[in-house]
């Protein structure tokens, strides 16, 4: 039988319907669809897809288990290397990781690995098997360790260390766990219930999770060592937002994407005044930037009643860093792309200090820059004014400086990132490990998880060597 | 959960609570603050650590009832718990070797300035404290501050107590008389901090103000709290809350503080209405 050239479609809420709610957009495969898609996998002897996966999931093996309808076994197979499949199946950029390498993709569309991963994780959860899959761990622990930050890097590191027999405590500065998965990525892309179940799973493994503790302020890393912790993993993320650097950036109605999304997702401003945190959207919103963060901010704006939402981006559509799928979703929902356009000044009302508009200028593409993407060059005299109520700056975040500031001996790099050995997560301070966005700058969920995993392994080796256990 | 072990009405509109928070109590320094969230769905509210007791493991917070969250907090009783409490946040105030200091406070700033006056006093500095309020009923902490100050001045706008006039009037006299004053610390309403900063600029006396921009996470993650200081955008929660008063763009701060005024009003009105209903229903 010839292979179906196309990926099996996954049902989505229609654009007209979904812009009016915060429910998940993509609805996931039903069993029949998953089986059809699983049958497209060639079960390669030398699977190229696995090379593309940052945590080397045994992709053909789990797909085979799907084809055999052994969904719980498939989930266990994925979880050998990836503890958050329900999250990754939804937000990983598979199109540039595993799927881009898939052999089927050479002539046809690649196997829908991400969709299958999501299907397996959802099947495990819906059948109540996550609970049953909790392993019983020995009461006696090897040593105490601390994880600073509960984003994907911290959660993964915590899970692995718990499995290895450690007494693990996660300290999180916000009042809720999950990092960007909670405060950044919106409900309609990653339902928070899924995250809650994953975090709960860690608790069942014996991981203690304490929120409202800001490492570096509430308690410092040297103090933790004094309390008898054997090692610390820092997964504090890239929380420091960048602003536009143009006049008017502090007018009321100019938000960083972090503020905007935190108000909406973490503080649930979309339920205001039922909840206490407001957000003011207005009728016309411009989001500057074109990454996943920008798409999320733009799509939230529509759902909160904005009439016109623009993405303002200084390069062309091709260079947009967001996932293709999310750009398509945004455009389907009515987000308008102002490409090759750069902000010049945010304009405001003299008296109230509130945003009225934004002066922008047209650009064209020049020579490639350091990032390999073609550099935007402004076209003199092409300025025009966009009428706006709200401007969201989604042009990037850098590593959170609080922990390095509280620990001068911790070596930091050019971008304020904690310098680590990429393969071990070691920092310049013995016993202190770091990984995820705090070490690399803003990257991906799966890269953060991979870093958490590698750090867990080397922390285990470090502690055992120190305690002379083998 | 963080249990309230003491609660006082400092005045009609200013309340004091002492809360169990051992980790915060053991690391807090003067000028730092906490963020609290009363319950699920609540907002994150920044409040200054007015005092701490390391032994008991408690921090004291003094707050003015102004909107939804502070109205609700005022209804909490001894034994009730606050859902989330994070701190200590911000940088400790850096007095940089000053010897003869005038501390000026207005409104709820009177409570916020207390730990700073106390610290300076304990370090053996000369501290003169000026406090002011609209009228006598709004004044508090006079005795507490007197105990840790070398000299004390009290003003009321209407003359109902102490000297009639503004705190800045007294400050001006002091600056005229005593040329050894090398630092002024001002905490209170934005407009008062602006007036004080404008005044001290004429005398070339370094001035620290404690800013209160709208905050969200209060850990440097969102930029809601940004203020312009010396032409640069800084974050109130991590770079402050104390800044050089001569460098602060107060006009921008005032505008940014009004950002959600309509929403805040709306939220407080709804809450008051609900409260009335629940009282009428005997809850
Ligand atoms: C809006 C948005 C959309 C995104 N979409 C995608 C996507 O579709 N796909 C994808 O792969 N990636 C996406 N990303 C990127 C991805 O979310 C991040 O790369 C990833 O979350 C990084 O994980 P982390 O664990 O390093 O840090 P984070 O997720 O940032 O978590 C860090 C945690 O540490 C806490 N913390 C910080 N400092 C301290 C401290 N001192 N003490 C205690 N706790 C502290 C923080 O509160 C936070 O909870 C997106 C990012 C954003 C902002
Ligand atoms: C670092 C810091 C320390 C603070 N310390 C104290 C303190 O010790 N005691 C105290 O009473 N207050 C303090 N504040 C102010 C306090 O956070 C606000 O009064 C509180 O958030 C109001 O919440 P609400 O829901 O009751 O009122 P809202 O409904 O949020 O606001 C009601 C009114 O207060 C104004 N407002 C809102 N947020 C602030 C703010 N951050 N600062 C000033 N006015 C605001 C609004 O413009 C509005 O007019 C501090 C603020 C900061 C940033
Ligand atoms: S490369 Fe494609 S076809 Fe081959 S094993 Fe991986 S998913 Fe299956
Ligand atoms: S309150 Fe979010 S950065 Fe200061």
Image (spheres, grey):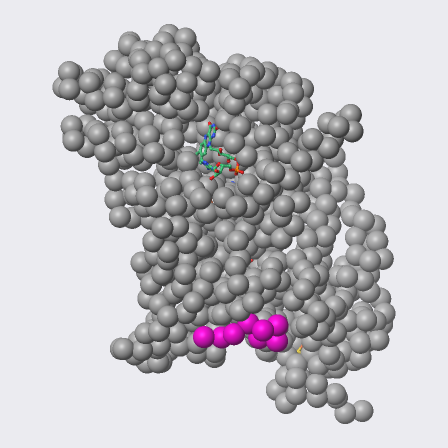
Q: Give the left or right position of residue B157, taking residue A295 as reference.
A: left
Q: Position of residue A81 (x, y in %)?
A: 67, 59
Q: Position of residue B209 (x, y in %)?
A: 32, 31
Q: Quadrant of the N terminus of chain A?
A: bottom right
- Residue A89 vertical placement versus B69 (above, below): below
- Residue A150 vertical placement versus B37 (above, below): below
Which sits in the foreground, A323 or B13? Answer: B13
- Residue A354 vertical placement versus B76 (above, below): below
Q: Quadrant of the C terminus of chain A?
A: top right
Q: Evaluate whether residue A399 shows in this view.
A: no
Q: Evaluate whether residue B182 shows in this view.
A: yes
Q: Give the left or right position of residue A180, taking residue B105 as reference.
A: right
Q: Which residues make up the magenta segment?
A: A331-338
> Could you tell me which residue is drawn at 30 percent across and 43 percent down?
B249
Q: Give the left or right position of residue A371, taking residue B247 as reference.
A: right
> Could you tell me which residue is drawn at 70 percent across and 85 percent down?
A6
Q: Quadrant of residue A112?
A: bottom right
Q: Position of residue A127 (x, y in %)?
A: 85, 57
Which sits in the foreground, A81 or A100? Answer: A100
Q: Quadrant of residue A372?
A: bottom left
**Residue at the outermost bottom position:** A2
> Could you tell me which residue is drawn at 16 percent across and 31 percent down?
B202
Residue B275, magenta (yes or no) = no
Which sits in the foreground, A17 or A411? Answer: A17
Count of picture labels:
0
- Residue A23 vertical placement versus B279 (above, below): below
Q: Position of residue A249 (x, y in %)?
A: 37, 56
> Could you tell me which residue is drawn at 23 percent across and 24 percent down?
B183
């Amino acid at each position: 039988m010839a292979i179906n050239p196309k990926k099996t479609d996954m049902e989505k809420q229609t654009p007209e319907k979904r812009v009016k709610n915060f429910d998940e957009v993509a609805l996931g495969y039903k069993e029949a669809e998953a089986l059809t898609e699983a049958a497209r996998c060639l079960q390669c002897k030398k699977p190229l897809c696995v090379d593309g996966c940052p945590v080397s999931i045994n992709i053909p093996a789990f797909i085979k288990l799907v084809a055999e309808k052994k969904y719980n076994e498939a989930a266990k197979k994925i979880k050998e290397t990836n503890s958050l499949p329900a999250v990754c199946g939804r937000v990983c950029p598979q199109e540039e990781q595993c799927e881009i390498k898939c052999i089927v993709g050479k002539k046809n569309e690649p196997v829908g690995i991400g969709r299958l991963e999501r299907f397996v994780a959802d099947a495990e959860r819906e059948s109540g098997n996550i609970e049953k899959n909790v392993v019983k761990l020995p009461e006696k622990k090897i040593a105490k360790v601390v994880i600073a930050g509960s984003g994907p890097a911290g959660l993964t590191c915590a899970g692995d260390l718990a499995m290895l027999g450690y007494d693990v405590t996660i300290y999180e500065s916000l009042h809720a766990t999950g990092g960007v998965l909670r405060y950044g990525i919106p409900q309609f892309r990653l339902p928070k219930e899924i995250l809650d179940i994953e975090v709960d799973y860690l608790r069942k493994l014996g991981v203690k999770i304490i929120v409202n503790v800001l490492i570096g302020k509430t308690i410092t890393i040297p103090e933790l060592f004094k309390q008898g912790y054997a090692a610390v993993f820092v997964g504090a993320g890239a929380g420091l937002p960048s602003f536009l650097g143009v006049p008017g950036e502090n007018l009321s109605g100019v938000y960083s994407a972090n503020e905007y999304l935190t108000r909406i997702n973490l503080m649930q401003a979309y339920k205001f005044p039922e909840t206490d945190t407001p957000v003011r959207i207005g009728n016309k919103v411009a989001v500057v930037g074109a990454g996943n963060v920008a798409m999320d901010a733009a799509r939230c704006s529509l759902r909160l009643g904005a009439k016109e939402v623009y993405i303002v981006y200084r390069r062309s559509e091709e260079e947009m860093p967001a996932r293709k799928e999310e750009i398509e979703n945004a455009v389907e929902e009515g987000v308008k792309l102002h490409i090759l356009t750069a902000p010049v000044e945010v304009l405001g009302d003299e008296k109230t200090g509130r945003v009225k508009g934004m002066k922008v200028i047209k650009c064209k593409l020049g020579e490639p820059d350091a990032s390999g993407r073609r550099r935007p060059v402004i076209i003199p005299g092409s300025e025009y004014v966009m009428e706006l109520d709200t401007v969201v700056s989604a042009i990037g975040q850098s590593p959170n400086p609080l922990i390095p500031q509280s620990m001068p001996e911790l070596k930091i790099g050019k971008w304020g990132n904690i310098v680590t050995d990429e393969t071990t997560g070691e920092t310049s301070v013995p016993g202190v490990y770091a990984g995820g966005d705090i070490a690399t700058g803003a990257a991906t969920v799966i890269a953060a998880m991979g870093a958490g995993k590698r750090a867990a392994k080397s922390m285990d080796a470090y502690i055992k060597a120190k305690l002379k256990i083998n | 959960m963080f249990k309230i072990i003491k609660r006082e009405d400092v005045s009609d509109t200013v309340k004091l609570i002492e809360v169990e928070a051992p980790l915060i109590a053991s690391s807090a320094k003067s000028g730092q603050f906490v963020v609290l969230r009363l319950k699920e769905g609540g907002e994150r509210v920044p409040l200054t650590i007015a005092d701490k007791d390391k032994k008991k493991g408690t921090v004291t917070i003094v707050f003015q009832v102004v909107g939804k969250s502070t109205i609700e907090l005022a209804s909490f009783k001894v034994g009730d718990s606050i859902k989330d409490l994070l701190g200590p946040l911000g940088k400790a105030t850096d007095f940089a070797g000053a010897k003869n200091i005038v501390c000026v406070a207005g409104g709820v700033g009177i409570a916020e300035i207390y730990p700073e006056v106390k610290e300076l006093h304990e370090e053996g500095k000369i501290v003169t404290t000026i406090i002011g309020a609209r009228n006598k009923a709004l004044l508090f902490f006079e005795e507490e501050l007197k105990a840790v100050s070398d000299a004390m001045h009290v003003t009321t706008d209407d003359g109902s107590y102490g000297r009639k006039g503004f705190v800045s009037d007294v400050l001006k006299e002091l600056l005229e008389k005593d040329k050894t004053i090398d630092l002024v610390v001002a905490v209170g309403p934005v407009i008062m901090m602006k007036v004080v900063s404008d005044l001290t600029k004429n005398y070339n006396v370094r001035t620290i103000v404690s800013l209160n921009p709208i905050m969200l996470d209060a850990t440097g993650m969102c930029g809601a709290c940004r203020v312009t200081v010396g032409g640069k955008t800084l974050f109130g929660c991590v770079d402050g809350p104390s800044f050089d008063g001569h460098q602060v763009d107060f006009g921008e701060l005032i505008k940014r503080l009004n950002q959600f005024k309509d929403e805040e009003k709306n939220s407080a009105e709804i809450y008051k209405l609900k409260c009335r209903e629940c009282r009428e229903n005997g809850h």
